[in-house]
Image: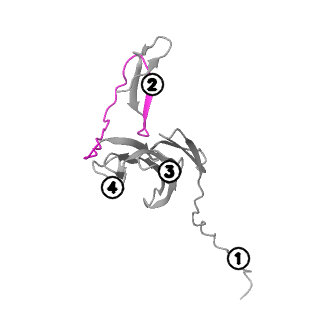
Amino acid sequence: SILCWDLARRRPRADAHARACPSGFPMLECAERPPQVQGARTTALVQRIGGINGIALHPDGTRLISVGQEKSVAVWDVRQPEPLQRIPLDAEQLTVALSADGSLFATGGADHKLRLWDMATAALLAECVGHSAAVRSIAWAPDGKQLVSCGDDGNILVWNVFYDMPPPPKPLALEAQDAGAQ
């Protein structure tokens, strides 16, 4: 359950309740009584081996990335009970973060590495070495051009992300023809 705390009184507020808004994302509202939700659907996503260390919800609200003790990255459709894909790794992953546009995600692990992935293909784009201990937390800059990581080594590292996407197709060049020309 989710509790909303009144920090001045150091106790939970009795008038705050969690519910799903129309987009499907959870939201917190303060009301006199709990909202009545009809037709609400909940899904349980279960990782079979070990615990889950981190999750990141895609901006579209339908996909989720999880990392955990089973030494893999799992890509989920939140409407399905089983992952769409599991990517095995050699080390336990401790954290995951999605870029604001949802095109990239990054993972950090017990092997001191930060990994950059393509969300559409789940392809590994880069394996970054800089920490001398486990990577514990990752955050993206809002523009997606930098990634910040912190680790058990006490360091906060800022990574510049240069990802060469193929250029968009050029629009067709149409020429006007003279109606009288043959």
The amino acid type of the residue labelled 1 equals Glu
The label nearer to you, 2 versus 4, is: 4
Q: Nearer the viewer, mark 2 or mark 1?
A: 2
Residue 59 in sight from this viewpoint: no
State the residue in front, 167 or 52.
Answer: 52
- Which stretch appears magenta? 22-50
Residue corresponding to mark 1: 175
Q: Main secondary structure of the magenta part?
A: loop
* Front of the two marks 2 and 3: 3
Q: Which residue is at 46% across, 56% downward?
A: 119
Question: Where does label 4 land, which residue?
Answer: 84
For mark 2, give the secondary structure. strand
Q: Residue furthest bottom?
A: 182
> What amino acid type is highlighted by mark number 3?
Gly
Residue 43 % position (x, y): 30, 41
Instruction: Tell me, yes or no, whether the two marked residues, 2 and 3, touch with CB atoms within 8 Å.
Output: no
* Percent coordinates x, y for residue 56 in the rendering: 43, 44
> Toward the viewer: 80 or 136?
136
Q: State which quadrant residue 141 falls in.
A: top right
Task: Name the amino acid type tagged 2.
Answer: Glu
Residue at (67%, 75%) from the top-left corner? 174
Q: Earlier in the sequence, mark 2 or mark 4?
A: 2
Quadrant of the rendering where the N terminus is positioned = top left
| 165 w.r.t. 51: above or below | below
> In the image, is residue 37 part of the stretch drawn in magenta?
yes
Per the image, label 1 sits on a secondary structure element best described as: loop
Q: Position of residue 19 (x, y in %)?
A: 39, 30
Q: Which mark is residue 102?
A: 3
Q: CA distance from mark 3 to mark 4?
A: 17 Å
